[in-house]
């Protein structure tokens, strides 16, 4: 499981899991507030067979928007703090 902090109370959780009998990458929002701690309905299940292609497409889109790999790694490191 991997997590990316979005704000003080919100993060995106990425994990490999099973959904309806098939392996998927589950990308879901998780929140921690005084009222609720847990996953929200916001998220998506991606068939494991296309997960690498999706990751590549995301990186290509970021690079097209003039973000270098160093910029991307820097932003990822900021989110992990």
Image (cartoon, rainbow, N blue to C red):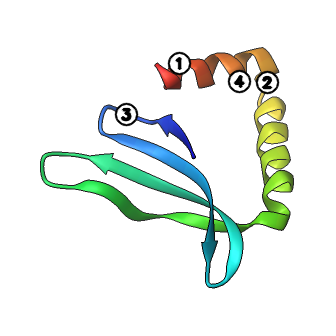
Q: Where is residue 11 in the image (x, y as percent from the top left)?
A: 43, 42
| In this rendering, position of residue 69 left or right of residue 2 | right
Q: Which of the two discs, 2 and 4, sits closer to the camera?
A: 4
Q: Do the residues labelled 4 and 3 touch (CB within 8 Å)?
A: no
The residue beneath circle 1 is 78
| In this rendering, position of residue 20 left or right of residue 4 | right
Distance between the alpha carbons at the discs numbered 1 and 2 = 19 Å
The residue beneath circle 2 is 66
The residue beneath circle 4 is 72
Q: Are marks 1 and 2 in contact (CB under 8 Å)?
A: no
Badge 1: few (under 14), some or many (20 or more) residues near its Cα, within 10 Å?
Answer: few
The residue beneath circle 3 is 7
Distance between the alpha carbons at the discs numbered 4 and 1 = 10 Å
> Mark 4 or mark 2, which is nearer the start of the sequence?
2
Badge 3: few (under 14), some or many (20 or more) residues near its Cα, within 10 Å?
Answer: few
Position above or below: 44 against 52: below
> Mark 3 or mark 4, which is nearer the start of the sequence?
3
**Residue drawn 51% across the image and 48% down it:** 13
What residue occupies the far left of the structure in this picture?
34
> Mark 2 or mark 1, which is nearer the start of the sequence?
2
Q: Position of residue 40 (x, y in %)?
A: 37, 62
Distance between the alpha carbons at the discs numbered 2 and 4 = 10 Å
Distance between the alpha carbons at the discs numbered 1 and 3 = 11 Å
Badge 4: few (under 14), some or many (20 or more) residues near its Cα, within 10 Å?
Answer: some
Confirm whether residue 68 shows in the render. Answer: no
**Residue drawn 60% across the image and 54% down it:** 15
> Mark 3 or mark 1, which is nearer the start of the sequence?
3
Quadrant in the picture for residue 72: top right
Distance between the alpha carbons at the discs numbered 4 and 3 = 18 Å
């Amino acid at each position: 499981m991997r997590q990316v902090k979005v704000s003080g109370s919100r993060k995106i959780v990425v994990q490999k899991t099973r959904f309806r009998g098939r392996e998927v990458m589950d990308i879901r929002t998780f929140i921690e507030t005084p009222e609720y701690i847990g996953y929200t309905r916001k998220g998506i299940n991606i068939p494991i067979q296309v997960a690498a292609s999706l990751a590549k497409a995301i990186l290509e889109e970021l690079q097209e928007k003039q973000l270098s790999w160093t910029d991307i790694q820097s932003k990822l490191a900021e989110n992990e703090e």
